[in-house]
Image (cartoon, rainbow, N blue to C red):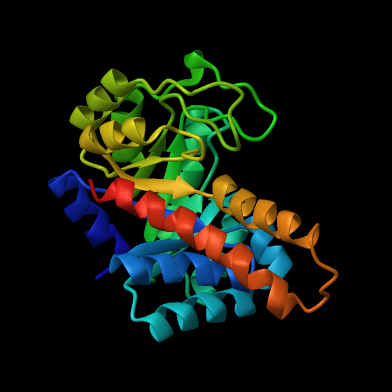
Amino acid sequence: MKLQEKLVKLREDKKAILAANFYNLETLQAVVGAASDANTSIILQLSESSIKYIGLPMAVKMAKTALEASGVEGWLHLDHGSNLKLVQDCLDAGFDSVMIDASEKPMEENIRISAEAVMLAESYGANVEAELGFIAKLNQQQQHSGFTQPEDALRFTGETGVNALAVSIGTAHGFYKEEPKLDIELLGRIRDAVDTPLVLHGSSGVPDSSIVLAIRNGITKINLATETKNAFMQKLKSDLLSTDEIDLRIVFPSATEAARELIRNKLRVLAQ
């Protein structure tokens, strides 16, 4: 099943799929292992910085091999592609899905660039995600004035043909200084205005109850990144304080398990 077909089905069923970023072999094992434990589908995400770190061919082979070896239904997705060349490179490399993020550009330019990404992906049969509205990135302040509006979402999806739309309703990338307040009423109006599956970015630190409400009101894809890195690194740092062990094959597994348990917990929330 193509990812765009999966997202449409999830929207119809008022359910959502977890899209988790990985950064190395260990976090990939954690994500796929958790999905296998839960007997559920998963989206593996790679950011531009992770692609540069791992290398594009290696990253694709790692992800595809992990899914095949585990028997998990999954898809490989480019997270926050900043330009069309990267989108093209990822499509050529075998990605099932790509995100073009021109959300910080003027509306007209965002529409033009996103529509080009859709055209690039057409011959590959790949899913295309775009972002509309302002979702604060690291060290940026979220602004209510940047929330996605239903009428803009309707125009954007109609003129671009994207398969999924990331919306701004109160989340931000990275950790929060205070508990985020999601505008569920606005989300419901966006859902009613468009047929396109909706995506929630910045779920790290969002209360489980808010995640459940978001899914019931139109979100079909939940992105997770920061918490996974944090779970892995906090456990690793803690373990290293109590050992002189230098064999990473001995010190990494407990950190991998910490990230795996985090993902398992997230999948339990999505299953509610």
Number of dots carrying numbers: 0
Q: Relative to the observer, which residue lies in front, 261 or 207? A: 261
Find the residue positioned furthest to the front.
242
Residue at horizontal 37 percent and vertical 66 percent from the top: 35
In this orientation, which residue lies closer to the viewer: 184 or 257?
257
Is 212 drawn above or below residue 250 in the view shown? Answer: above
Query: Which quadrant is the N terminus positioned in?
Result: bottom left
| Spot occupied by residue 165 in the image (x, y as percentages of width and height) | 37, 41
Q: Residue furthest top?
A: 145
Residue 86 place in picture, x, y as percent: 61, 60
Specify the quadrant that holds the C terminus.
Answer: top left
Q: Residue 249 appears in which quarter of the rendering?
A: bottom right
Closer to us: 36 or 53: 36
Q: Is residue 218 visible?
A: yes
Q: Residue at x 39, y 51 (%)?
A: 265
Looking at the image, the residue that sits furthest to the left is 12
Q: Quadrant of residue 147?
A: top left
Q: Which residue is at a point 60% across and 74% down the rendered structure image?
A: 59
Image coordinates for residue 110, horizontal then vertical, percent: 50, 37
Tell which of 142 and 90 is nearer to you. 142
For residue 25, side relative to residue 145 (left or right): right
Asked if one can make out residue 111 in the rendered structure from this viewpoint, the answer is: no
Residue 244 against residue 218 in the figure, above or below: below
Horizontal and vertical percent position of residue 204:
51, 40
- Which residue occupies 70% across, 29% down? 139
